[in-house]
Amino acid sequence: MSWKMMLYEYVHHKNQMNLDYSVEPLLPFVTDVPFLQAQIRRLARTSQNDQDRHYSPVKNETRLTITQTIEQPAYVTASIRLRQSMVGIIGVTEHEEKRLESEQLTFEEQEGKWVITNIQSTGNELLQPTQRVVMSPSAASVPQTVDQGLLKLSSMPFLNYEVLPYLEPALRKNYYDRHKAVQYADRWWDQANPAYLEFEVDCSNYISQCLFAGEAPMHYTGKRDSGWWYKGRNNSQELWSFSWAVAQSLQGYMTSNDHGLRAKEVHKAENLELGDVISYDWNGDGRYRHSTIVTAKDANGMPLVNAHTTNSKHRYWSYKDSYAWTEQTRYRFLHVIDQD
């Protein structure tokens, strides 16, 4: 069996693993013990969480894309993207979650057969916030696009002129349109909007875009450590606020702001509405490193969220199926104030 055939076997058995909550299908050909141990812990959490929700998985489908390979005499390294569709039921209600995951696998031939000796998840919630941007051909012209009028910045909070072109700035009312925020979140959950730069850790950049699409007023200060704003990139100059792209700064801005985009913290996830935001502190140390937006509710009335980094649509809010989740994980449930 070639390494490529082994890769397809891996994807097939991993798909089954997520239905059975067991790593047993991988044991004959995966020798990465830390990976297997992490999977055992994750699957145990997921199983318990699904039981608590009265959720039963029905089917999983996974599409594989090989994005890069490096072939050496002794080993092969393959970077892959997995597009997953997971269907389950609560009572008689069917729920579908979609997710994109990226991994890097190392294959070695041992005693005449290929085995997978290392599996690294890439682009997941464990990654720390960074200002490094993923430059793509579609993003190369973003600063020019933005400067030409996508975001008409002023020194005061404002709404997107493209949304309400007939109103004078002084007459505008700040109103958060949850429907538009969710529409945007569902439209761009699995890819980057070419009107914006894509960050290596893109979760809060994506959430800010959703909030702005919901007509949350941008607050342009020109200072990276104040306001909530995005303008793009000009040569090496990064033209966006930390609150736009960093989870810790975004939740801090939303809860401390007294006008424009602001939020009130609620104490239960079920109190959130569509278009609200959840911030995640994985280690319980007060540093929030991930952001999601509520885009649906399950049959129990609990939030389902969209996110980037590990791109997800209608994922259960608790994230206990994440590699980043720990027993110390804490959440901030942020209810966006609808109107000033």
Image (cartoon, helix red, strand yellow):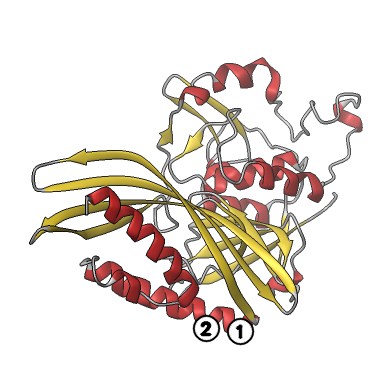
Using the image, tell me which numbered label, if any, was put on residue 115.
none
Q: Answer above or below: position of 54 versus 132.
A: below
Disc 2 vs disc 1: Cβ atoms closer than 8 Å? yes
Q: Quadrant of the N terminus?
A: bottom left
Tell me residue 126's x, y (percent).
Answer: 40, 58
Question: For mark 1, does the 10 Å Cα neighbourhood hold few (<14), some (14 to 19), or many (20 or more) residues?
Answer: few
Asked if residue 148 lies left or right of residue 79, the reply is right
Asked if residue 270 lies left or right of residue 45, the reply is right
**Residue bearing the label numbered 1:** 52
Viewer-side residue, 308 vs 290? 308
Tell me residue 185's x, y (percent).
Answer: 67, 47
Q: Residue at x 8, y 43 (%)?
A: 73
Viewer-side residue, 110 vs 231? 110
Q: Residue at x 40, y 64 (%)?
A: 14
Tell me residue 44's x, y (percent).
Answer: 44, 80
Q: Residue at x 65, y 40 (%)?
A: 209
**Residue bearing the label numbered 2:** 48
Q: Mark 1 falls on what kind of element?
A: helix
Viewer-side residue, 46 vs 265? 46
Q: Mark 2 falls on what kind of element?
A: helix
